[in-house]
């Protein structure tokens, strides 16, 4: 119950900061009542829909930043490979559908992993199952299993894998 | 014209070219999903164009529009897909739970 | 010409390079959407090359705008695109996969007969 209160307070603070930033007025008088109204309605609706938990509270874990840096390099590398295929005078590809086993159990970690696979061009997560993901690869060369293992290891290190 | 204005103009023109290609895919796309994909990518380019436009003409207002467009573009894609998957927008989250498709749902499209 | 204006010009040069690269990537992704054979392969070109192109363009715009409220809004825009774009692509791919759309799974060359490319 206390955790729920903590999430609610965090959400309210973040929304207030966002509103102050985007309105351009800061927290000064004009339209302030409208801002308060919209924040209260948003928090109330979040509680009513039962979405208020650790996933819905926007916060950034610092360990993620290192992971994002590594991910950015991977994205650039894969992008160059895809652009080379697309801009070649004759496109020659062999698309594959493959299944990769995933041992992560934490929801946030699994979502991060699936989104990372999707973000690197050349592989897109098509279906999420209990013990693995089904991926579509633009070409065979994007679908080496050891590449997938590296991703999983990095995500495991970034999220700390607190278990379900 | 200053240096940055020329760059903004060039980038805007390239984005418009990409948008036209997306419209071609939208009209000839053989399956529904090609069209959804084209609409989504078109929206992403509109957002970028609005951002470039905001700085090119010095009106920061259109950045707010770009932010809204980015969010609505996402929601619209999900809503279209949900409608064509279930023929209704009133499916509760719990009913969508089974992660594997039923065997009888394999046909269609 | 003093040092400040030289620095300013350098920043503008870097921003121009970033923006032109980003726009080039977006344009190449659009060409890929036209050229590739079936839905699942087009998805790679449409969804993901766009994301890198978009982030590069937004980075260039941030450099161009300097340290203002505009930059903060641009950074927020970049974050939103970074988070929603892979989710939208996954949603489209998942819907197509569940509806039973068959992917093309054999080796394909763009100069062979084209009628089987759905």
Image: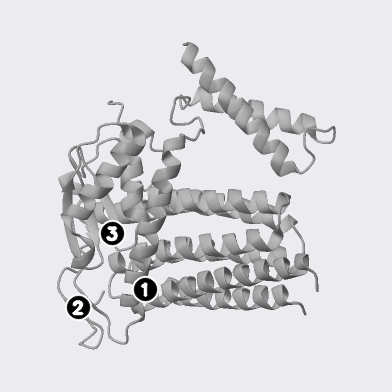
Query: In the rendered image of this protein, does residue C69 appear above or below residue B5?
Result: above
Residue B5 vs residue C117, the one in the foreground: B5
Residue A58, image x and y in percent? 51, 33
From the image, tell me which residue sits under label 2: C108
- Badge 1 is on which residue? A83
The disc numbered 1 marks a residue on which chain? Answer: A
Q: Nearer the viewer, residue B108 or C40?
A: C40
Seen in the picture, residue A155 relative to C61 is either above or below; the reply is: above
Q: Which mark is residue A7?
A: none
Using the image, determine if residue B103 lies above or below residue A139: above
- The residue beneath circle 3 is A123
At which x and y percent is residue C7?
A: 70, 66
Q: Quadrant of the C terminus of chain A?
A: top left
- Where is residue A81, by image quadrant? bottom left
Left or right: C55 in relation to A117: right
Chain of the residue under the numbered disc 3 shown in the image: A
What colouring does the structure picture have?
Answer: one colour
The mark that comes first in sequence, 3 or 1, is 1
């Amino acid at each position: 119950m206390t955790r729920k209160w903590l999430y609610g307070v965090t959400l309210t603070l973040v929304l207030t900061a966002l509103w102050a930033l985007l309105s351009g007025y800061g927290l000064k008088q004009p339209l302030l009542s409208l801002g308060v109204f919209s924040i209260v309605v948003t928090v109330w609706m979040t509680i009513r829909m039962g979405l208020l938990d650790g996933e819905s509270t926007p916060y950034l874990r610092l360990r993620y930043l290192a992971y994002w840096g590594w991910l950015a390099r991977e994205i650039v590398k894969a992008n160059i490979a895809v652009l080379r295929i697309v801009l070649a005078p004759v496109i020659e590809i062999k698309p594959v559908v493959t299944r990769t086993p995933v041992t992560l159990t934490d929801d946030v970690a699994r979502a991060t992993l699936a989104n990372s696979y999707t973000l690197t061009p050349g592989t897109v997560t098509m279906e999420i199952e209990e013990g693995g993901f089904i991926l579509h690869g633009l070409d065979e060369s994007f679908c080496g299993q050891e590449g997938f293992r590296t991703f999983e290891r990095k995500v495991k290190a970034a999220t700390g894998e607190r278990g379900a | 014209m200053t240096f940055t204005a020329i760059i903004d103009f060039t980038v805007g023109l390239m984005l418009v070219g990409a948008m036209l290609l997306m419209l071609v895919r939208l009209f000839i796309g053989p399956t529904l999903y090609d069209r959804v994909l084209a609409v989504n990518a078109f929206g992403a380019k509109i957002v970028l164009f609005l951002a470039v436009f905001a700085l090119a003409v010095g009106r920061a207002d259109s950045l707010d529009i770009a932010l809204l467009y980015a969010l609505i573009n996402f929601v619209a894609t999900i809503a279209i897909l949900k409608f064509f998957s279930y023929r209704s927008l009133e499916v509760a989250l719990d009913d969508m739970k089974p992660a594997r498709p039923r065997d009888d749902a394999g046909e269609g499209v | 010409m003093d040092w400040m204006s030289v620095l300013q010009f350098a920043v503008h040069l870097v921003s121009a390079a970033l923006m032109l690269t980003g726009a080039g990537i977006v344009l190449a992704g659009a060409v890929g959407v036209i050229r590739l054979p079936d839905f699942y392969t087009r998805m790679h070109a449409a969804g993901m090359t766009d994301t890198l192109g978009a982030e590069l363009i937004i980075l260039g715009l941030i450099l161009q705008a300097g340290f203002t409220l505009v930059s903060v809004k641009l950074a927020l825009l970049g974050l939103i695109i970074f988070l929603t774009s892979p989710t939208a692509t996954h949603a489209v791919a998942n819907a197509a996969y569940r509806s039973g759309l068959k992917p093309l799974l054999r080796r394909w060359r763009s100069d062979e007969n084209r009628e089987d490319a759905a």
